[in-house]
Image: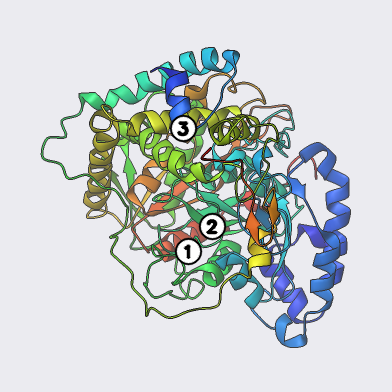
Amino acid sequence: MELFFETLTGLREKLATKKVSPTEVLDALKKRVEAVEPSIRAFNHIDWETARAEAAALTPEDLAKPLGGVPVAIKDVMAVKGQPLTCSSRILKGFVSPYDACVIEKLRAAGAIPLGRANMDEFAMGSSTENSADGPTHNPWDTGRIPGGSSGGSAACVSADEAIVALGSDTGGSIRQPAALCGCVGLKPTYGRVSRYGLVAFASSLDQIGPLSKTVEDSARILQVIAGHDARDNTSAAEPVPDYLSGLNQGVKGLKLGVPKEYFIHGIDPEVEKIIRDAIQHLSDLGAEIVDISLPHTNYALASYYIVAPAEASANLARFDGVRYGARVKDGKDVIDTYCRTREKGFGSEVKRRIILGTYVLSSGYYDAYYLRAQKVRTLIRRDFSEAFGKCDAILTPTTPTPAFKIGEKTEDPMQMYLADVFTIAVNMAGICGLSLPCGFAAQGKHGRLPVGLQIIGKAFDEATLLRVGQAYEQSTEWRKERPACA
Amino acid sequence: MDVSYVAHLARLALSQDEITRFQSQLSGVLEHVGQMQKLDVEGIEPTAHASPVYNVFREDVELPSLPVEDALKNAPQQANNLIIMPKIVE
């Protein structure tokens, strides 16, 4: 088997026993990237030379560490010292990170090598990776379709075996949705579980970093390394980090898994619904108790999110004004004109729409009707989940209402695009955790096979249960062995 | 929503084409989020943050930080360890 097909867990075994060297791993990945990248376009930039130098400098002690010698693809929204950071935006063209994000420090301390800047929707705003100044990423299962977003590059590079594992960020589904559409595993940890230091802020009360991987165990290994308190992120939680690997194989016997009726109504693709129902039955056959639950405010999650997230984004993106970093128009008449036209030239359409929407809902006269009301709805969404978790240990839903759609299909209709995240958004609004993993294929697309993802939602700081349920499902099915057409 | 007025509040210049396009697209979005108005939120406390947020204090001591040269490396225009900007006050 070619090295690039390896899982993180499998590769670590080979690296720890010196069957392969970190530079051999990089050579294999380079070969793979050169072969498939022209049709996938998952990366904005890859600095092979620096990665090779870092790999060559790893000591035997480094190689004994949990991620020793493992290259990790990084979404182009997290700072890696000395590497470009563009957020797939023209406004950050040429920007070079002056420091490492907290997650990068932690990856390095565990022996990993950050490799490549994965494509994304500009500033993580989007569900298809089409809102990228560098052009769209293509879905490895059907290159005429989108990979999902905003972490579409991270999902596509893992799915196409251009990366062993990747980091993404998730504000309304941006890890889970592309993971589902590309057929890989994606984990959004609980808000506060992973430090946001060095992550470019989109919506600060919702953003969270997490892994995209080929298996559930691989995601557990990455979370183990990146989780934990960091004094530089005031919202990072001082909760202890449990051992995510020790309980992985406990199975689902004795667990109560809730199925919310509100996630099986209008707009869901019949094939997706059937596949999810089968996955739920499979977990029941494995010994889990399936219970019906209700999350009555589900319908309002999307509406409240599209107030809260743009509001926070409009404030966060005020810093991109061409003063301290990034591109600046040279012929501004005065300072205001310089700001206005730098932002006009630097931002793409979706970012502009969200800045305008966010500014509007925060403006005088509209604040109570929109922003304050959305925050109250957020309280109701949180309550729904805390009541549901009185009846079950985790919740099962589809990750997305449909499989991957065609490139260009929704670009002119933002509302239709937003609906792609209808099942993932409530998790961010409640600040809890969610995992998506492959659970079958819809007979659609160019090759008649498009991946479908099962979402498992957990209580705050209970990632261990998500991983345990995911592992039980994954290891008793064969989906993880499927490879896309480009392989 | 008056798109060009709000865009100016956000210090964002737009082309005429963008104004027309965003006007109709954002109307669609506002119509959807308007669903929230149907909900009774009387007496519900707003949630600004998913986790409890509180002030985080530390000792008021100097800690190592980014050197000036590194902090300025990405500035579009600079001289003498300062960022150069168009004149603000005549």
At label 3, the amino acid type is: Ala
Is residue A482 in view? no
At label 2, the amino acid type is: Gly
The answer to which image quadrant residue A356 occupies is top left
- Chain letter of mark 2 equals A
Which SS class for mark 2? strand
> Label 2 to label 3, Cα distance in Å?
31 Å
> In this view of the protein, which residue sits in the foreground, A55 or B53?
B53
- What residue do we see at 49% from left, 42% from top? A318
What residue does disc 1 label?
Answer: A194
Q: Residues within 10 Å of mark 1 (few under 14, many from 20)?
A: many
Are the numbered discs 1 and 2 placed on the same chain, yes or no? yes
In this rendering, position of residue B39 left or right of residue A483? left
- Chain letter of mark 3 equals B
Question: Are dots 1 and 2 in contact, CB under 8 Å?
Answer: yes
At label 1, the amino acid type is: Val
In this rendering, position of residue A370 left or right of residue B24? left
Quadrant housing the N terminus of chain A? bottom right
> In this view of the protein, which residue sits in the foreground, A158 or A206?
A206
The tag earlier along the polypeptide, 1 or 2, is 1
Furthest residue toward left: B43
What residue does disc 3 label?
Answer: B10
What residue does disc 2 label?
Answer: A210
> Label 1 to label 3, Cα distance in Å?
31 Å
Q: Residues within 10 Å of mark 2 (few under 14, many from 20)?
A: many
> Label 1 to label 2, Cα distance in Å?
8 Å
